[in-house]
Image: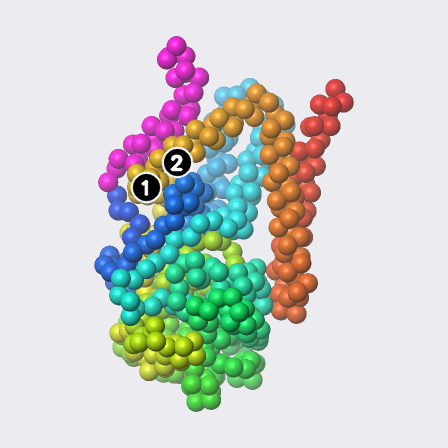
Amino acid sequence: MINRLVKKHRKLIFFIVILFILFLIPTSRLKPIDGVTGLPLEGYKIKIPATAYILEPFVGVSQYFWRFTDFRFQTLSWLVWIIVLYLFFNLKRKINISERLKGLFKVLISFVLVCFFITLVPLPKYSLQPENPKEILIDLHSHTTCSHEGIASPEENIRWHLAHGFDAWAITDHPRTLEGARRAKEIAKEKYPQAVIITGQEIKCYTGKQGENFLLLGIDEVIDERKYGREIAKIANLIHEKYKGAVIVPHWWRKKFHNLKNLAEAGVDGFEIYTARALGPERSIREAIKDVCQGNNLIMLGSSNWHGWGSASHIWTSTHIADWPKLNKDEREEAILKALRDRKADQFRVILYNRVEPQNRMRYLFEPFIGSFYYFSSLNGSQFLSWIIWSIIFYSLLCLIRERPIFLDLTVIGIALFLFSKGITFLNLWVRYLAYNEILLILGNILLCFGAFLLIIAILPLVHRKLR
């Protein structure tokens, strides 16, 4: 009897055994790390909601993908290896070419759906809590639907930042608008009194396709960067003198057009050294930014660069503001801007919720194996138990679907309806923000078309079985 059960469910047992072996391997857990030194930090606590433990396979996978330092390359590595492994394990199966292609098509559709899930589905969020009450957490680079590629409304921007433990943050939409920050401030005044929002703008000082992005913080009117071209010093002087604001260079490593030293001499107040959802930076680039900042007393920051894609955040910047609890919103905003203007570099600290792993192209070539090893071997007991339970649930559902294919069709219909609803939501948002936004129309139509495609795929087998 036991042998029969083991033989029948050997795939599930094999998967659980592999998970257990990886769980027993001693590797470093996720923990707060100093973004500059790479050393573990004391005095900070990660708050993980109970729902995150319950939904660990969903939350953990999303967190894992959003920690990619080379998102496109690592995602492509996953796709290629999934295809290779599918073809390898089906070599001995005696199926014709059409069946093999049909199976490969299902694999690709499943991969696309996982990508949709990671980027669009809201999940429980980790937050960071400093033990020192005088220390606050800030994010000086985020976006809303008033940016051309943002998919989060101003209110969603507020809720996302509060859920991750941020005390204050800047909304830096682009191009040439402050509408997202203004709307967010109006909403916060009515519904979120604890939210401190700094008005900002992300500009592109380009000539042709060459140039750099800059964050202008603390401004109260739109800056048209086209008037200044590459004259960064003029822009920095304008922000400092007229608006008493600050200028930060975000994700410099994406373009590397201006020399770091020249940017420092032009009057910028600091650099991002980590940015979620922006490729890199490599260690050598972080060291170069670190040297320039320390040599010129400039601020080093870690930012979310959140556009609404994905639920996870693993980067915060902390700073000390005297008498923070006693200050009103305007005073809090001014205190942060003053610390930036005065370049109190020792008051700012970049914090990552991460672990030390190799990050290079060789690792990325084998990302599914190396990434899975580090992820599963770093699970704690509660997360491991969640994986076991969900593995049994998924396996049972697969067995049920194999016996009764109608359940697969109903599942696909449910997914199709979800994509439809998301598509309609994005198109409704686009109508409200069409003066600023481009991506909502494209994404909304993609989701509607993909949902319709899945609906047809699911309904046709039902009709076919009914006719038979």
Q: Nearer the viewer, residue 419 or 43?
A: 43
Image coordinates of residue 99 in percent, x first then y, are 61, 26
Q: Residues within 10 Å of mark 2 (few under 14, many from 20)?
A: many
- 156 above or below 215? above
Q: Where is residue 140 in the image (x, y as percent from the top left)?
A: 42, 70
Sequence-earlier tag: 1 or 2: 1
Q: Nearer the viewer, residue 441 or 289?
A: 441
Residue 13 highlighted magenta (yes or no): yes
- Quadrant showing the C terminus: top right
- Can residue 173 be seen from the camera position used here? no
Q: Say what secondary structure mark 2 lies in.
A: helix
**Residue drawn 60% across the image and 40% down it:** 415
Residue 387's disc is 2
Q: Distance between the residues labelled 1 and 2?
A: 10 Å
**Up-down relation of residue 103 to residue 152 (above or below):** above
Query: Going 48% across and 60% down the picture, which residue do you hit?
Result: 159
Q: Which amino acid does label 1 sit on?
A: Leu
Q: Do the residues labelled 1 and 2 touch (CB within 8 Å)?
A: yes
Callout 1 environment at 10 Å: few (<14), some (14 to 19), or many (20+)? many
Q: Which of 433 and 76 is in front in this view?
A: 433
Magenta region includes residue 289: no
- Tell me if I can see residue 343 in this picture: yes
Identify the colour scheme used: rainbow
Q: Which image quarter is the N terminus in? A: top left
Q: In which quarter of the image is residue 10?
A: top left
Work out whether 279 lies above or below 223: above
Provide the residue designation for mark 1.
379
Residue shown at the point (32%, 54%) measured from the top left:
46
Q: What residue type is labelled 2?
A: Trp
Which picture quadrant has residue 342?
bottom left
Query: Magenta span covers which residues?
Result: 1-26
